[in-house]
Amino acid sequence: MSAARAIRALTPPDIAARKGRTPLVCLTAYTTPIAQLVDAHCDVVLVGDSVGMVLHGLPSTLGVTLEMMILHGQAVRRGLERALMVVDMPFGSYEESPGQAFDNAARVMAQTGCAAVKLEGGESMAATIRFLAARGVPVMAHVGLTPQAVNALGGYRVQGRGDDADRIQRDAVAVAEAGAFAVVLEKTPEALALRITQEIAIPTIGIGASPACDGQILVVDDMLGLFGAFLPKFVKRYAELGEAASAAVSAYSQDVRERRFPAAEHVFGDEPKT
């Protein structure tokens, strides 16, 4: 019997080559079981710094550390075979200088086995993206609403309305020209997303940025109905697993209180002879 054919993992050039073709399917993952679940269906799996809010109960992504991203990246890596794995660079790990960004990105790639990193920012980060790309670190960029800058932006607001559209467009052009292989557009109007998608040569991946993009990404816990703290208006729930899990825990609690469990001898004793 011949050995099973190895699954070829997608690479940053593969993702870049999807520009204008079949839309890219992207989801976040933070654990091995979820990575295994989404791998066959996704082109990109992002270990997002949203893990701080979704799994660690933090009020924003600002408290996420490099160590946390590495730990969750290692877990996700164990669950993937096909999808491209990208790890978010957390706040404070890349903004100081291109050198700082390279040192920390190299550490993330070496310790997690990811194929690329993601960082937030447009024109201000172009020099850093260029520095990383020239040294073998594939970069996915992120413009529009950048959650790590939520305090400076005044909240999780739509970006790129009115005169602000030109700023977002300049950001997208800057990261594309700097060497990013793809760019996330978050919470931008559809007309702007379409304009950017048509102008730049790399894929745009939307989150709250309309179907005009070359792909879409969601936080997997939002999509599955597992994260109930808040629900962004742009998120479509494909399941309500949080409600199902709550009902299951309630049923278990009731069974415990009413002692509805098999007797020990029925579980651990010898099988009855026939």
Image: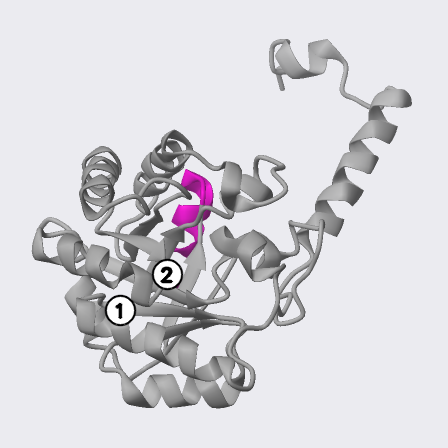
Would residue 12 appear left or right of 119 to someone viewing this image? left
Give the residue at the far right of this rendering.
Answer: 258
Residue that label 2 marks: 121
Residue that label 1 marks: 175
Contact? badges 1 and 2 (CB < 8 Å):
yes
| Nearest the eye: 265 or 157 | 157
**Residue at (79, 44) in percent of width and height:** 247
> Residue 181 occupies which quadrant of the picture?
bottom left
Label 2: state its secondary structure: loop
Where residue 115 sits in the image (x, y, percent)?
A: 21, 51
Residue type beneath disc 2? Gly
Residue type beneath disc 1? Val
Where residue 265 sits in the image (x, y, percent)?
A: 70, 9
Label 1 neighbourhood size at 10 Å, few (<14), some (14-19), many (20+)? many
Where residue 43 sits in the image (x, y, percent)?
A: 32, 65
User: How is the structure coloured here?
Assistant: one colour
Magenta residues (range):
30-42
Relative height, residue 142 to residue 161 (above, below):
above
Would residue 188 appear left or right of 94 to someone viewing this image? right
Label 1: state its secondary structure: helix
Q: Is residue 34 shown in magenta?
A: yes
Where residue 107 sits in the image (x, y, percent)?
A: 22, 35
